[in-house]
Image (cartoon, helix red, strand yellow):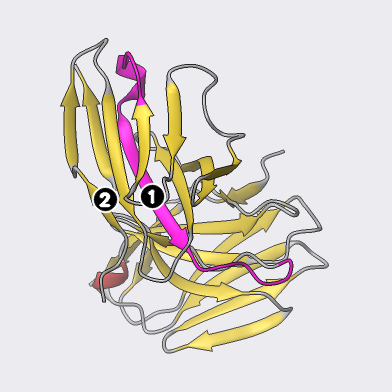
Amino acid sequence: QKEVEQNSGPLSVPEGAIASLNCTYSDRGSQSFFWYRQYSGKSPELIMSIYSNGDKEDGRFTAQLNKASQYVSLLIRDSQPSDSATYLCAVNRPGAQKLVFGQGTRLTINP
Amino acid sequence: NAGVMQNPRHLVRRRGQEARLRCSPMKGHSHVYWYRQLPEEGLKFMVYLQKENIIDESGMPKERFSAEFPKEGPSILRIQQVVRGDSAAYFCASSPRHTGGFQETQYFGPGTRLLVL
Protein backbone atom coordinates (compact mmCIF):
# COMPACT_ATOMS: atom_id res chain seq x y z
CA GLN A 1 0.00 0.00 0.00
CA LYS A 2 1.37 3.41 -0.95
CA GLU A 3 1.71 5.93 1.84
CA VAL A 4 -0.23 8.55 -0.11
CA GLU A 5 -2.54 7.57 -2.93
CA GLN A 6 -4.22 9.68 -5.55
CA ASN A 7 -6.10 8.81 -8.69
CA SER A 8 -3.65 9.74 -11.43
CA GLY A 9 -6.43 10.78 -13.78
CA PRO A 10 -6.66 12.46 -16.13
CA LEU A 11 -9.72 14.09 -14.63
CA SER A 12 -11.68 16.15 -17.11
CA VAL A 13 -14.15 18.78 -15.86
CA PRO A 14 -16.14 21.37 -17.84
CA GLU A 15 -15.42 25.02 -17.21
CA GLY A 16 -17.52 26.43 -14.39
CA ALA A 17 -18.12 23.06 -12.74
CA ILE A 18 -16.72 21.75 -9.45
CA ALA A 19 -13.53 19.69 -9.64
CA SER A 20 -13.09 17.16 -6.85
CA LEU A 21 -9.66 15.71 -6.12
CA ASN A 22 -9.16 12.93 -3.61
CA CYS A 23 -6.27 11.57 -1.60
CA THR A 24 -5.91 8.81 0.97
CA TYR A 25 -2.99 8.21 3.31
CA SER A 26 -1.88 5.21 5.29
CA ASP A 27 -0.28 6.57 8.47
CA ARG A 28 -2.83 7.48 11.13
CA GLY A 29 -0.26 9.60 12.93
CA SER A 30 0.00 12.14 10.13
CA GLN A 31 -1.01 15.62 11.25
CA SER A 32 -0.23 17.99 8.40
CA PHE A 33 -1.75 17.86 4.92
CA PHE A 34 -1.03 19.96 1.87
CA TRP A 35 -2.29 20.43 -1.65
CA TYR A 36 0.14 21.69 -4.27
CA ARG A 37 -0.51 22.58 -7.89
CA GLN A 38 2.14 21.87 -10.50
CA TYR A 39 1.97 23.14 -14.04
CA SER A 40 3.91 21.16 -16.64
CA GLY A 41 7.62 21.94 -16.39
CA LYS A 42 7.15 24.11 -13.31
CA SER A 43 7.64 23.69 -9.58
CA PRO A 44 4.94 22.80 -7.04
CA GLU A 45 2.95 25.76 -5.79
CA LEU A 46 1.10 25.62 -2.47
CA ILE A 47 -2.67 25.76 -2.77
CA MET A 48 -3.79 24.87 0.74
CA SER A 49 -2.69 23.40 4.03
CA ILE A 50 -5.03 21.73 6.51
CA TYR A 51 -4.39 20.33 9.96
CA SER A 52 -7.82 19.77 11.57
CA ASN A 53 -10.80 17.67 10.63
CA GLY A 54 -13.42 19.47 8.59
CA ASP A 55 -13.40 21.99 5.81
CA LYS A 56 -11.07 24.88 5.10
CA GLU A 57 -12.01 27.37 2.44
CA ASP A 58 -9.81 29.84 0.52
CA GLY A 59 -11.44 31.56 -2.40
CA ARG A 60 -12.55 28.95 -4.92
CA PHE A 61 -10.66 26.20 -3.11
CA THR A 62 -11.92 24.05 -0.25
CA ALA A 63 -9.82 21.41 1.47
CA GLN A 64 -11.58 18.68 3.43
CA LEU A 65 -9.92 16.44 6.00
CA ASN A 66 -11.30 13.31 7.61
CA LYS A 67 -8.67 11.73 9.84
CA ALA A 68 -10.90 8.82 10.85
CA SER A 69 -11.17 7.78 7.20
CA GLN A 70 -7.61 8.91 6.42
CA TYR A 71 -8.91 10.96 3.57
CA VAL A 72 -8.20 14.47 2.33
CA SER A 73 -9.80 16.16 -0.64
CA LEU A 74 -9.64 19.39 -2.60
CA LEU A 75 -12.66 20.99 -4.24
CA ILE A 76 -12.25 23.67 -6.88
CA ARG A 77 -15.41 25.66 -7.53
CA ASP A 78 -16.13 27.53 -10.76
CA SER A 79 -13.27 25.70 -12.49
CA GLN A 80 -11.26 27.75 -14.97
CA PRO A 81 -9.03 26.56 -17.83
CA SER A 82 -6.10 28.02 -15.86
CA ASP A 83 -6.80 25.40 -13.16
CA SER A 84 -5.61 22.72 -15.59
CA ALA A 85 -2.54 21.24 -13.91
CA THR A 86 -1.36 18.31 -11.83
CA TYR A 87 -2.49 18.47 -8.20
CA LEU A 88 -0.22 16.91 -5.62
CA CYS A 89 -1.38 15.74 -2.21
CA ALA A 90 1.35 15.78 0.45
CA VAL A 91 1.27 14.39 3.97
CA ASN A 92 3.84 14.66 6.71
CA ARG A 93 5.39 11.47 8.04
CA PRO A 94 4.92 11.44 11.80
CA GLY A 95 8.08 12.09 13.75
CA ALA A 96 9.90 13.27 10.65
CA GLN A 97 9.96 16.72 9.15
CA LYS A 98 9.39 15.72 5.58
CA LEU A 99 6.52 15.35 3.18
CA VAL A 100 5.36 12.26 1.37
CA PHE A 101 3.73 13.07 -1.94
CA GLY A 102 1.12 11.22 -3.92
CA GLN A 103 1.61 10.60 -7.61
CA GLY A 104 -0.59 13.57 -8.45
CA THR A 105 -3.89 13.90 -10.30
CA ARG A 106 -3.83 15.50 -13.71
CA LEU A 107 -6.80 17.85 -14.04
CA THR A 108 -8.05 19.28 -17.33
CA ILE A 109 -10.70 21.98 -17.42
CA ASN A 110 -12.52 22.04 -20.75
CA PRO A 111 -13.74 25.42 -22.03
CA ASN B 1 10.42 39.29 -1.13
CA ALA B 2 12.55 36.68 -2.82
CA GLY B 3 11.34 33.13 -2.73
CA VAL B 4 13.44 30.01 -2.78
CA MET B 5 16.19 30.34 -5.36
CA GLN B 6 17.87 27.53 -7.21
CA ASN B 7 20.60 27.51 -9.77
CA PRO B 8 21.33 26.52 -12.34
CA ARG B 9 17.85 26.07 -13.76
CA HIS B 10 19.13 23.64 -16.36
CA LEU B 11 22.26 21.53 -16.18
CA VAL B 12 23.67 19.17 -18.77
CA ARG B 13 26.36 16.71 -17.80
CA ARG B 14 28.02 13.76 -19.47
CA ARG B 15 28.15 10.43 -17.73
CA GLY B 16 30.87 10.37 -15.09
CA GLN B 17 30.91 14.12 -14.47
CA GLU B 18 29.87 15.86 -11.29
CA ALA B 19 26.70 17.90 -10.84
CA ARG B 20 26.37 20.65 -8.22
CA LEU B 21 22.94 22.06 -7.53
CA ARG B 22 22.51 25.12 -5.33
CA CYS B 23 19.60 26.31 -3.24
CA SER B 24 19.08 29.49 -1.25
CA PRO B 25 16.10 29.27 1.10
CA MET B 26 13.44 31.91 1.49
CA LYS B 27 14.43 34.76 3.79
CA GLY B 28 13.82 33.80 7.40
CA HIS B 29 13.73 30.08 6.67
CA SER B 30 16.30 27.85 8.29
CA HIS B 31 15.15 24.45 7.04
CA VAL B 32 15.98 23.11 3.58
CA TYR B 33 14.68 20.01 1.85
CA TRP B 34 15.69 18.41 -1.42
CA TYR B 35 13.28 16.39 -3.56
CA ARG B 36 13.72 14.58 -6.85
CA GLN B 37 11.07 14.20 -9.51
CA LEU B 38 11.68 11.65 -12.23
CA PRO B 39 9.77 12.07 -15.51
CA GLU B 40 6.07 11.31 -15.06
CA GLU B 41 6.59 10.48 -11.38
CA GLY B 42 5.82 12.14 -8.07
CA LEU B 43 8.18 14.02 -5.83
CA LYS B 44 10.47 11.90 -3.68
CA PHE B 45 12.11 13.21 -0.53
CA MET B 46 15.89 13.06 -0.50
CA VAL B 47 17.32 15.01 2.42
CA TYR B 48 16.46 17.54 5.11
CA LEU B 49 19.05 19.97 6.41
CA GLN B 50 19.44 22.82 8.82
CA LYS B 51 22.47 25.09 8.93
CA GLU B 52 25.59 22.90 9.26
CA ASN B 53 23.49 19.82 10.05
CA ILE B 54 22.00 16.97 8.06
CA ILE B 55 18.84 16.07 9.94
CA ASP B 56 17.39 13.32 7.74
CA GLU B 57 19.04 11.80 4.69
CA SER B 58 16.87 8.70 4.51
CA GLY B 59 15.91 9.40 0.89
CA MET B 60 19.42 9.88 -0.42
CA PRO B 61 20.97 7.16 -2.56
CA LYS B 62 23.76 5.50 -0.63
CA GLU B 63 26.45 6.32 -3.15
CA ARG B 64 27.44 9.34 -5.22
CA PHE B 65 24.95 11.75 -3.62
CA SER B 66 25.75 14.21 -0.84
CA ALA B 67 24.25 17.41 0.53
CA GLU B 68 25.36 20.23 2.73
CA PHE B 69 24.02 23.49 4.12
CA PRO B 70 26.98 25.51 5.37
CA LYS B 71 26.85 28.32 7.88
CA GLU B 72 27.31 30.80 5.06
CA GLY B 73 26.01 30.36 1.56
CA PRO B 74 23.48 28.14 -0.17
CA SER B 75 22.68 24.52 0.32
CA ILE B 76 24.45 22.26 -2.17
CA LEU B 77 23.29 18.93 -3.57
CA ARG B 78 26.23 17.16 -5.14
CA ILE B 79 26.01 14.19 -7.47
CA GLN B 80 29.30 12.54 -8.33
CA GLN B 81 29.90 10.41 -11.42
CA VAL B 82 26.44 11.05 -12.82
CA VAL B 83 24.59 8.34 -14.74
CA ARG B 84 21.68 8.65 -17.15
CA GLY B 85 19.26 7.55 -14.43
CA ASP B 86 20.10 10.72 -12.50
CA SER B 87 18.31 12.79 -15.14
CA ALA B 88 15.42 14.40 -13.30
CA ALA B 89 14.11 17.64 -11.85
CA TYR B 90 15.61 18.42 -8.47
CA PHE B 91 13.57 20.70 -6.28
CA CYS B 92 14.61 22.49 -3.15
CA ALA B 93 12.07 23.61 -0.58
CA SER B 94 12.40 25.65 2.58
CA SER B 95 10.33 26.19 5.68
CA PRO B 96 10.52 28.23 8.85
CA ARG B 97 11.38 26.75 12.23
CA HIS B 98 8.99 23.97 13.20
CA THR B 99 6.50 24.35 16.02
CA GLY B 100 5.11 21.44 17.95
CA GLY B 101 4.55 18.26 16.01
CA PHE B 102 3.24 19.92 12.89
CA GLN B 103 5.02 20.19 9.59
CA GLU B 104 5.41 23.79 8.57
CA THR B 105 4.54 24.62 4.99
CA GLN B 106 7.34 23.97 2.55
CA TYR B 107 7.82 26.44 -0.29
CA PHE B 108 9.46 25.19 -3.44
CA GLY B 109 12.08 26.72 -5.64
CA PRO B 110 11.92 26.62 -9.45
CA GLY B 111 13.99 23.46 -9.63
CA THR B 112 17.08 22.35 -11.52
CA ARG B 113 16.52 20.14 -14.54
CA LEU B 114 19.47 17.80 -14.84
CA LEU B 115 20.09 16.01 -18.09
CA VAL B 116 22.81 13.39 -18.25
CA LEU B 117 24.00 12.54 -21.73
In front of the other: B19 or B87: B19
Q: Residue furthest front?
A: B71
> Of all residues shown, which one is farthest toward the top?
B16
The reply to whether discs 1 and 2 touch (Cβ–Cβ < 8 Å) is yes
Q: Is residue B42 above or below residue B102?
A: above
Q: Residue at x 26, y 50 (%)?
A: B6
Q: Is residue B60 magenta?
A: no
Q: Which residue is mark 2?
A: B6
Query: How far across and down, in percent of the image, does residue A48 sit?
Result: 50, 74
**Residue under circle 1?**
B92
Where disc 1 sits, the SS reads strand
| Residue located at (70% from left, 82% from top) | A54
Location of the C terminus of chain B by quadrant is top left
Q: Is residue B35 above or below residue A29?
A: above
**What type is the residue that disc 1 sits on?**
Cys
- Residue A49 in the image: state x and y as whole percent: 55, 73
Seen from the viewer's position, the closer of residues A33 and A21 is A33
Nearest to N terminus: mark 1 or mark 2: 2
Q: Position of residue B72 (x, y in %)?
A: 35, 52
State how far apart marks 1 and 2 are (Cα): 7 Å
Residue B25, image x, y percentages: 37, 59
The answer to whether residue A40 is seen in the rendering is no
Q: From the viewer's perspective, is B61 left or right of B56?
A: left
- Residue stretch rendered in magenta on the structure: B79-101
Q: Answer with the quarter of the image where residue B10 lies.
A: top left
> Mark 1 vs mark 2: same chain?
yes
B93 with respect to B1 (left or right): right
Q: Residues within 10 Å of mark 2 (few under 14, many from 20)?
A: many
* Total numbered badges shown on the rendered structure: 2
